[in-house]
Every structure is written in C-alpha cells, then in structure tokens.
Image: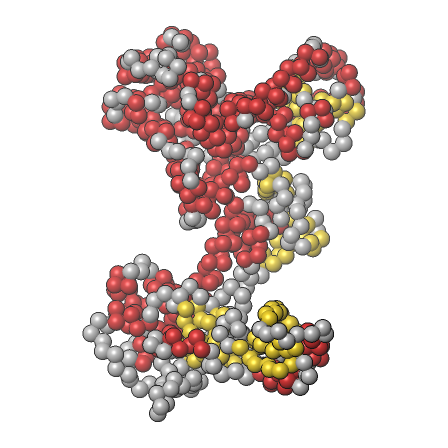
C-alpha cells in the first residue's frame, strides 16, 4: 500500500511546486474516515482510493484531482459530509467528491429507459468538470483490476457496464491505453472462454517469434539514426486479446489469417520529423496499399494525432506503424489528462503554452454535442441510441466548401453531414454536391469528400430519412421535425374546429382566452390543447365549457361566410371540409352538408386525414369522423360504422370532394363478387377489371358453396362513375352471379 510520502514524491516528479499540505491532509482524512473498513478481497479499504490516486499520478494530474481521488468514497461509504469536506478542502473539491458520489449510485446496466436516464446524469456530471470523469475512470480501472473477488453475476454486470459505457468514454476522451485495459479486463469476464483462447494463441505466437519484436525495433531504430533522426524512439508491442478478438469478429477472420498482430510506434521530436521518418520507412520497405492514414494534418475529434501506415517489414512480417511526436504520444495515451488545463486551473504558471488546452478544443467537442442533445428534449431511448452511436462508430472526415472539417461515423450520408453542420441545414436539405457533382442523398461519404448542401426554405425532412441516416443527431432531429409537422397540422385543424364551435355558441375563440382554462383541460400549453382537439383526444365542447363554465348548450344561428364555411387543408389535397354542427332534416336524419359544416384538404400519408379501410371515391357522399390519435377518417355516407357515432355529433365533420380536372390520383373501393367455382373464372374477372382501366390492389378468396366462391377485391379507381361501369361489366359475365360494393 502506497505511503503518504510516496504519494507526494510521485506528484513532485512532474509538479515540483506541489501543494504538499493538501495531499497530506487528504491522505490523513481518508485514512481516518475509512478506518477499519475492508474490501471484498480482505484488503484495507483505504488501499482502493490510494491506488486510484496512483493511477492519476501516472497521468500527471494536479494535486486537487489527486486529493479528490483520495476522498472520492468518503461521502458514500463513511460518516463524512459534503459540508465537512467543503470546510476542510474547499468547495471545488467538495463539488467534485459529491459529483463522484452521485455517479457511483447510477446503475448503467438496467432496462433501456432507466439506463438512458442514468447515462444522462453521468454526462451532465462530467460536463461540469471533466476531472470527475478522470477520477471515475481511474476508480473503474482499479475496480476492474480487482474484480476477481466479486461473485460471477456481479463480475459480469460490472464488466458489461464497463464495456458499454466507460471504455468507450475513455476512448472518446483520447485515453486509448486506459480504454484498451478496460476492454481487456471486461472481455476476460464477459467471454472468459474466448479470452482464454485468444490469450493462449497470442502466447504461442510470441514464443514462436521470440525476439522478433526486439529485432524489428533495433532495425527500425538503426535505420532512422543512420538517416539523421538520432533522437527517434521505437516501441513495439503485441496487440491485446480484445483488439485481436474484435478484428477477428468484424472481418470474419481466423487467428491464422491475422497478419498484423504487432504494432510499432516511432516517436520523434517534431512534426517535420514525422514526415521524414515516414519517407525513410517507405523507401526501405514496401507499403501495404490502402493502409495509410494521416491524422496529423486531420486530427481525430478527441485531438488524437499520428501517422498510420502498414509495411511489409523485416522478416517479411506485416507491421503496423504509428509515427508521432512526444506531445502527440502523451495525448494518445492520456487524452484530455495530458493537457495542462487541469494541472493549472487557477491561472498559475504551469506547462508551456503549446500544451494549453483551449475551451474550444476538440477533446470536448463530442461531450459538448452530447450535452446539447440533452437540451433538445429527446426521449431517453432516443438519447441512449444517439450516445451509443457516437461512442462506438468509426469515423470519416469530410469538408464543407469553406474547408471546415466535419467528422462523421462510417456509412454517413450527406443528410448526416447537413445535420452535423447545423440542425436547420439538415431540416432544409434537398440535395447535395459531393466533390462538385450532384449526388443522391443516400450516397455514403468517404474520407476527404467535400460536401455542399443544397437547401430549400419550404423543405420538411421526410420520415423515411430516419432509415437512411446513421448519426443519432440526425435521427433525433428528423423525428422531432416529423412530430412538429404533424403536431402543426393537428393544431391547424383543431384551431378551425374550435373557431366554429365557439362561433356556433355565440362566442369568440382566441389563444389568449384558452390560457386560463388549461388547468381544467389537463394541458400545459395552449398549442397542446389545440392539437389535442385536432387529434380527437379532446372534445371542442369540453374546451368551450372550460373557457365559459356558465355556457348552456344552446344553438346560435350563425350567418354563413362568403365561402359558405368550406376550407382547404394542405395535407388533404382533393377535399374540402366543414366543421362539426350538422343539421338534421325533418325526419331527424343527419344532413351531410348542413349550413354550419367545416373544411380540410389532404391525403399526404403521415398527416391527419385518412380513408376508411374500405375506401371512398370521388362521387361518393362522404363524411369525416374525428378519431383519437388518427385525426379525421373519411367514410362514405353509406358506411354502417357511422351509426356508432350518432350520439357524438361533435365528432362529425362534413366533407366534399374538391378535385381539379387534371387530378391523377386513384382511390380505393372494395367490392365482393360471387362467381362459379371453376377453372378460368378468376382470369375472366381479372380481364374485365383490366379492360376497364382499373387496378387490383388486393384480392382474397373464400369458398361459400360447392359451386360458388366469393372474391373480394380492393380496387384503385378514378371515381364512382368508373366503378359503376365496372360493376355493370362484371354482372354481365356468365360466370358471375352477384357483384356488390362493400362498406365498412
């Protein structure tokens, strides 16, 4: 167990002006509070915060962060309080310790909605101060190293959580070494059989090639020094079991087919030396085509920079090479922890200016985008999908016409690109130019593509785009835009219905008048209440009574407007509508086109106007019924189902056809045919339908007698006259005994 003076010495090695008093006080306080507590292994509990602190000293973090590591379990597991820590160590350290306490209580391996909500809390906690994440990752790393003393069930649960959340988070923050160790430790417990197999094969390979890594290191080093790069360092290593296993799975390879199990890093003094080393290596050994990546000129979003290449090197082995500066190597290993921002938060003199991390650094870009998505109000499942897509996807790098770099997951489309630039650009996207050529929006983008988005002010993103895009941000934005468009249409319909209902009652409707009555209707916003009326969830009469509690249901005669009350609706092309309030004739029968009826237009798929399953066609007398969550359903007046709405007159909306002469739409009509059960009958009927320029949408057959069968067709026709002509033609067929139209 690390002693007090050893901890101080560790920090002094990289920060000579360390605040020893703070570290000593935190060490003693943690030791006193944890007292005689034991871990599952039987070790003193204080060994855990000490090991977490030791891990953070390897990252060269400031003494405040080391103190937080020593104290991170005190509020959760001892009698310590936030106030006590604030008094002894300051509010800054107290806030960090409390943030870590809250994270510890989160269960990130639970049912989807709960997991998403807990992930929200985790990211919000680390967005306040990323040191919370650094301490949490070190805490998780030590727990994973000592997981053997837990039960098998708990080991599997903690490993799954680590693999799903903490290892990818470490990767996103640029801490690749920590990510690799977390993944391997998790792999060992999640899939122990595969872990043992891969580990054994790697050990056998290492024994067969004993000394090969050192031989390659020496040869590379001698070559670089001979060419003038005297200070170049070469480090070789065998890949980790999980990295090998993942590659075998993703590329469907056997272990014997893997050709690049070894990786080597060449570390030089500056950027020009990186490219010089690249030229030396490529001149000496053959390059494997398609395996070159330059992350120095185009850094990854977590600030990672390096040149990657693969060569057929000494001993004719395929070797992966990474070439980088010492500064780049620090960032590659420690990520955000390598920056001086966390070593010098108080503005004191610290690391050199080139090591400083600006608030707009790429190291925070992913975290900022994720936190932005919290504010956009996605539901928990969408947020979880968004975050996991961001965590796990490899990337491609594309450019705007002005040269701005946009990083996207592999497989991304121009639609993803548009939403990555700005949500409004995605919502108004209608096309794209890729490298100067107009290309389909479903085109998969490649590294280096220049993408120009073509926009339109009247565009609304189609719901089908959700199946095309791959980024969580794009999917969330498309869902929001679709919901907003549908809600707007429902609100427009609801507003017209309320206007007419209030008008019939001799009242004037306005949004301001509705505000005081929202609590009576159980609604939070005026637009929510109006949209609920449009969806049929809320009766317009209930709204009237809520606004005017003393109102008596007496009809007031309203003079028809100049257009006789009929109106169009954008989503229902080909129809006009009138609002509820049908009159009745002398016999008490509902009139379809009473003087107080209302109007709408449209049939555009995802909107609020729909046909009944049996259909309706131009020429039919039709009526609209407000149905909950459906909007308006159009029925022919003959439909028997309308009887069940006789006692709900507020749900009836008068509708009439409003088709122009150039209309090219077909409409569904359902017919039933009784015909002889003999060969050729169906062909004869189908021929008659085709001759009448009618299309068959669906067909079902049922046997009703030994000699007769019943055929049921859903047909696509232009209008009622065409349907009646077809029915006449069918009745004249010798094999047909009966034809009738069906209504729901």
- In the displayed orientation, state which residue is furthest to the left: 550
Residue 679 screen position, x and y as percent: 72, 73
Q: Specify the color scheme.
A: secondary structure
Which residue sits at x=59%, y=41%?
409
Q: Residue furthest front?
A: 706
Split into 4 quadrants, where in the image is the N terminus?
top left
Q: Is residue 41 above or below residue 553?
A: above
Whether residue 39 is visible:
yes
Q: Residue at x 43, y 75 (%)?
A: 641
Question: Which residue occupies the foreground of this view, 375 or 22?
Answer: 375
Residue 113 in the figure: left or right of residue 386: left
In the rendered image of this protein, does residue 449 appear above or below residue 149?
below
Q: Position of residue 13 (x, y in %)?
A: 46, 11
| Residue for point 60% across, 51% down | 468
The residue shown at (29%, 84%) is: 556
Instruction: Report the number of discs.
Output: 0
Q: Nearer the viewer, residue 15 or 95?
A: 95
Q: Residue furthest bottom?
A: 586
With respect to residue 574, does 606 lie above or below? above
User: Residue 210: image x %, image y %?
Assistant: 69, 10
Residue 112 point in image, percent of width and height: 44, 41
512 sits to left or right of 261: left
Comparing 664 with 154, the one in front is 154
- Residue 349 can be seen in this image: no
Q: Quadrant of residue 124?
A: top left
Foreground of the two, 242 or 309: 242
552 horizontally vs 672: left or right: left
């Amino acid at each position: 167990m690390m002693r007090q003076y050893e901890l101080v010495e560790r920090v002094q090695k990289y920060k000579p002006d360390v605040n020893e008093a703070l570290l000593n006080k935190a060490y003693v306080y943690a030791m006193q509070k944890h007292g005689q507590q034991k871990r599952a292994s039987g070790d003193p509990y204080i060994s855990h915060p000490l090991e977490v602190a030791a891990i953070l000293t390897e990252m060269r973090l400031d003494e405040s962060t080391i103190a937080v590591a020593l104290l991170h379990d005190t509020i959760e597991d001892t009698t310590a309080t936030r106030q006590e820590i604030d008094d002894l160590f300051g509010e800054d350290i107290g806030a960090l310790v409390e943030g870590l306490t809250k994270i510890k209580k989160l269960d990130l391996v639970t049912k989807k909605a709960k997991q998403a909500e807990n992930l929200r809390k985790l990211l919000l906690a680390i967005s306040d101060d990323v040191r919370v994440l650094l301490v949490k990752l070190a805490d998780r790393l030590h727990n994973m190293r000592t997981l053997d003393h837990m039960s098998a069930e708990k080991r599997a649960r903690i490993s799954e959580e680590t693999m799903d959340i903490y290892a990818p988070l470490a990767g996103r923050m640029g801490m690749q070494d920590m990510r690799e160790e977390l993944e391997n430790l998790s792999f060992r417990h999640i899939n122990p059989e595969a872990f043992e197999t891969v580990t054994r094969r790697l050990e056998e390979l290492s024994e067969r090639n004993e000394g090969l890594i050192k031989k390659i290191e020496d040869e590379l080093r001698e070559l670089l020094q001979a060419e003038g790069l005297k200070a170049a360092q070469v480090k070789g290593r065998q890949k980790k079991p999980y990295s090998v296993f993942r590659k075998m799975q993703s590329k469907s390879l056997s272990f014997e087919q893997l050709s690049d199990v070894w990786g080597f890093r060449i570390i030089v003094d500056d950027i020009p030396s990186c490219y010089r080393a690249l030229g030396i290596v490529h001149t000496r050994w053959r390059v494997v085509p398609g395996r070159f990546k330059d992350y120095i000129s185009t850094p990854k979003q977590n600030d990672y920079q390096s040149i990657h290449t693969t060569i057929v090197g000494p001993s004719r082995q395929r070797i992966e090479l990474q070439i980088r500066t010492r500064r780049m190597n620090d960032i590659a290993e420690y990520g955000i922890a390598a920056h001086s921002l966390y070593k010098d938060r108080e503005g004191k003199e610290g690391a050199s200016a080139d090591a400083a991390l600006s608030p707009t650094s790429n190291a925070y870009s992913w975290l900022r985008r994720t936190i932005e998505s919290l504010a956009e109000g996605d539901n928990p499942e969408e947020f979880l999908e968004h975050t996991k897509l961001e965590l796990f996807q490899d990337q491609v790098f594309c450019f705007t016409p002005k040269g701005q770099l946009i990083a996207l997951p592999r497989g991304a489309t121009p639609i993803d690109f548009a939403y990555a630039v700005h949500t409004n650009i995605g919502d108004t996207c209608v096309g794209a130019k890729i490298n100067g050529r107009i290309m389909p929006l479903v085109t998969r983008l490649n590294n280096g593509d220049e993408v120009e988005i073509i926009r339109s002010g009247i565009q609304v993103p189609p719901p089908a785009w959700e199946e095309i895009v791959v980024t969580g941000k794009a999917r969330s934005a498309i869902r929001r835009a679709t919901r907003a468009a549908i809600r707007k249409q429902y609100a427009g319909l609801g507003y017209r219905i309320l206007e007419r209902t209030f008008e019939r009652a001799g009242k004037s409707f306005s949004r301001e008048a509705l505000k005081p009555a929202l609590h009576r209707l159980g609604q939070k916003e005026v637009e929510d209440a109006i949209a609920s009326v449009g969806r049929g969830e809320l009766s317009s009469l209930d709204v009237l009574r809520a606004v005017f509690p003393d109102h008596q249901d007496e009809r007031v005669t309203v003079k028809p407007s100049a257009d006789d009350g009929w109106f169009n609706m954008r989503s229902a092309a080909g129809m006009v509508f009138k609002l509820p309030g049908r009159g009745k004739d002398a016999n008490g029968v509902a009139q379809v086109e009473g003087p107080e009826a209302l109007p709408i237009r449209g049939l555009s798929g995802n909107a609020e106007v729909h046909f009944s399953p049996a259909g309706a066609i131009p020429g039919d007398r039709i009526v609209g019924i407000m149905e909950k969550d459906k909007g308006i359903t159009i029925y022919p007046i003959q439909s028997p189902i309308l009887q069940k709405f006789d006692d709900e007159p507020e749900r009836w909306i008068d509708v009439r056809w409003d088709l122009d002469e150039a209309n090219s739409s077909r409409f569904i009509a359902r017919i039933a045919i009784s015909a002889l059960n003999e060969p050729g009958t169906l062909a004869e009927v189908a021929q008659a339908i085709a001759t009448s320029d009618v299309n068959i949408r669906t067909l079902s057959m049922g046997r009703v007698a030994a000699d007769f069968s019943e055929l049921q067709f859903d047909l696509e026709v232009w209008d009622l006259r065409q349907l009646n002509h077809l029915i006449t033609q069918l009745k004249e067929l010798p094999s047909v005994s009966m034809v009738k139209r069906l209504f729901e």
